[in-house]
Image (cartoon, grey):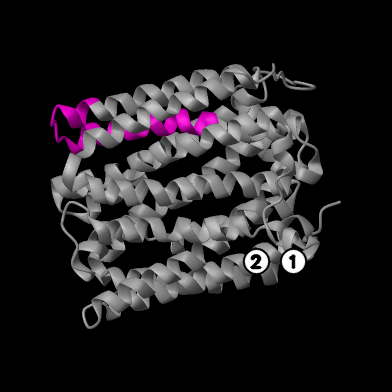
Amino acid sequence: MVAIRGMFADTAPLANPHFRRLWQANIITVIGAQLTVVAVPAQIYAITGDSGYVGLTGVFGLLPLVVFGLWGGALADHFDRRVLLQVTTFGLIATSGLFWVQAALNVNNVWLMLGLFALQQAFFAVNQPTRSAVLPRLLPAAQLPAANALNMTVMMAGAIVGPMIGGILIPVLGYSWLYLVDTLTLFATLAAVWRLPALAVENRVGAPGLRSVIDGLAYLRLHPVLLTSFLLDLIAMIFGMPRALFPEIAHQSFGGPLEGGTEFALLMAAMPVGAVIGGVFSGWVSRVRRQGRAVIWSIVLWGAAITLLGLAVGLAPRWPLPMLAAACAFLMVGGGADMASAAFRQSMLLSAADDAVRGRLQGVFIVVVSGGPRIADTLHGYAAGLLGTAWTTGGGGLLVIALTALVAAIVPAFRRYRPA
């Protein structure tokens, strides 16, 4: 009985009331957030019929993520982190509300949408490193892997429900209702953040300017294992995240409607399904000591799954329904691998960093984790116009495997890494 219980997610972090409230609020909020994740590319593709414009979300999302991710980490190492979470959550509510307004008024202006998306990403880039930086202040170090697995599971669960609901309801209700739900559900997170204790930074040094950002990067440079974890994630996301192609794949390869539909919803939801399954059975994560090797194998598995996804897309004209099922299965495997990789990498970063620089390192983390897929959106959108969706997807997966093996060979310290 004990062995069976050990297979399932470790829920010990939920005994902390502050973490529990944040986690429970995320169950509601992440569903609404994923509705917007689905609605923005679908609306842009419906307006333009061009994956290149969908890929521009990568350009418009990347710059604010880099600038405000790095600067937001410096802010999180200077100001009370509770206050920062309150301010940025208000900002996210406001931008989601503006998305709702433009859809309700049928503005149909791609550049307005991209501008709103950039503003939303700026608030997100400050909010997320601050949110992650508070975890070691709320929980003991031994519970961080379990806490990260729990957070990842909730995020991915919302990413299942959101795309399924959004993809199916877009043709029925339109985009405005999806944006409205996102706006309203964010108030759950605001309530949880409001009840946090004061979270002033311990041993605060300097001011949150450029010098502070540079000092944080210099700290990271002295920790090659953490630097390698960022590099591996960039490889996995830039070359192996073809989500900008999902509207085109769903429409042209699997016969879905132009404006979304079931095929698009299944592709968007499959990866989170795999991550949730991996999260539910994540009890093993807390027991792994060779975390560096675990990250390497997780990313190799991710690359293999994306390679097979490209193969399924290429064979779709012959067998559309079986290949749609295969594509979803491969995305599920990739989602489980990504969950494990993220849990280990985040735990390595949180446990190794001092509190005085934790916000800045989390800023780098959010730039890498969110910026990598933004680069991938642009890269895949452009490459698909030259190579097609199948070759772009499958080739990206092969590059992930090859580059991960190369980095593992060059940095043996990462392969051998174990937490202290």
Outermost residue to the right: 420
Q: Residue at x 23, y 61 (%)?
A: 248
Q: Which mark is residue 359?
A: none
Residue nearest the observer in this picture, 285 or 415: 285
Q: Secondary structure at mark 1?
A: helix
- Inspect the image, locate mark 1, and give the three-letter code of the amino acid beneath it: Arg
Segment colored magenta: 101-129
Q: Which residue is mark 1?
A: 415
Secondary element at image label 2? helix
Give amino acid for label 2: Ile
Tell me the quarter of the picture where residue 238 sits: bottom left
Taking 270 as reference, is 77 above or below it?
above
Task: Locate residue 217 relative to residue 140 in the image: left or right.
Answer: left
From the top left corner, tell me how far across and down residue 392 is, in percent. Answer: 34, 69
**Alpha-carbon span between mark 2 and mark 1:** 8 Å
Say which residue label 2 marks: 296
Seen at 46% across and 39% down, the residue is: 30
Q: Position of residue 96 (x, y in %)?
A: 34, 28
Q: Earlier in the sequence, mark 2 or mark 1?
A: 2
| Labelled pair 2, 1 in contact (Cβ < 8 Å) | yes
Q: Position of residue 202 (x, y in %)?
A: 78, 22
Q: Where does residue 140 sit, x and y in percent of width and height?
A: 80, 38
Residue 209 left/right relative to 294? left
Q: At 29% across and 46% down in the image, what residue appears?
A: 166
The answer to whether residue 214 is seen in the rendering is no
Q: Residue furthest front?
A: 1
